[in-house]
Amino acid sequence: MAGHDTGKNKTVWKDRKHFMWFPFSFTTYELKNDRLYEERGFFSTSSDELLLYRVVDLTMKQTLSQKLYGTGTLILKCRVDSNPEIRLENIKHPRQVKELLSDMIEEARTRHRVVGREFYGDTNYVNDADDEYDMEDMEDDDEMR
C-alpha cells in the first residue's frame, strides 16, 4: 500500500478485485487527487470517478473466506444520483484501506468546505466560506410562503 501523499496526480492507493488471493479480474481501483477511480472490463471497459467529499458512509465487510485470504469489501454510500453505493470488492488489506479512505474523505470535505447538512437534504447551507448568509432574508422568504 502506498504512503498517504496527496500530491498532484500522485496515486495514493491502487488495487484490483481479487479472486481468493489472486488478482485475476479486470476491475481496478485507484485513489488519487481526492477521487476514487474504478475501471471494469476487458473487451468493453467502463470507468467511474467519485469525488471523495461526496461519501457519507464507509463500511467494511469480510466473509469467512475473505478473512482466510486477507481480502474484504468496502461499501461507500455516496450522495450522488448515478450510483449511491460503490463497492470495492475483494481488495487486499481492507482495514488499512478503510482508514486511509476515511482520512482522505475528511480532508476532502474540509478542503471543499462541505458541511453535514449538505448531505441530509438541507438546502439552506453555505457552500463557500466567503459567502454571508443573512438570517433576515431567510425570515422574509418564510413570510412570503
Image: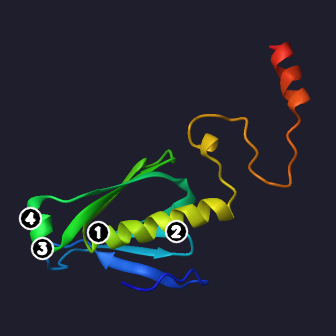
* Secondary structure under the numbered disc 3 in the rendered image: helix
Image marks 4 and 1: residues in contact by CB distance under 8 Å = no
Image marks 3 and 4: residues in contact by CB distance under 8 Å = yes
- The amino acid type, in three-letter code, at marker 4 is Ser
Q: CA distance from mark 4 to mark 2?
A: 28 Å
Q: In the displayed structure, does residue 54 sit left or right of residue 39?
A: right
Residue 65 pos. (x, y %) = 8, 64
- The amino acid type, in three-letter code, at marker 1 is Pro
Residue 43 pos. (x, y %) = 27, 73
**First of labels 2, 1 by sequence position:** 1
| Residue occupying the point 32% across, 78% down | 15
**Above/below status of 29 relative to 109:** below
Q: CA distance from mark 3 to mark 2?
A: 26 Å
Crowd rating for badge 4 (residues with CA inside 10 Å; few <14, some 14–19, many 20+): few
Q: Which residue is mark 4?
A: 65
Crowd rating for badge 2 (residues with CA inside 10 Å; few <14, some 14–19, many 20+): many
- The amino acid type, in three-letter code, at marker 2 is Met
Q: Which residue is mark 2?
A: 104
**First of labels 1, 3 by sequence position:** 3
| Residue occupying the point 49% across, 81% down | 4
Q: Which residue is mark 1?
A: 94
* Secondary structure under the numbered disc 4 in the rendered image: helix
| Residue occupying the point 73% across, 40% down | 125
Q: Which residue is mark 3?
A: 69
* Secondary structure under the numbered disc 2 in the rendered image: helix
Q: In the displayed structure, does residue 51 sit left or right of residue 113?
A: left
Query: Between residues 8 and 45, which one lies in front from this camera angle?
Result: 8
**Above/below status of 109 relative to 91:** above
Image marks 1 and 3: residues in contact by CB distance under 8 Å = no
Residue 42 pos. (x, y %) = 27, 74
Q: CA distance from mark 3 to mark 4?
A: 6 Å
Is residue 73 something one can see in this rendering? yes
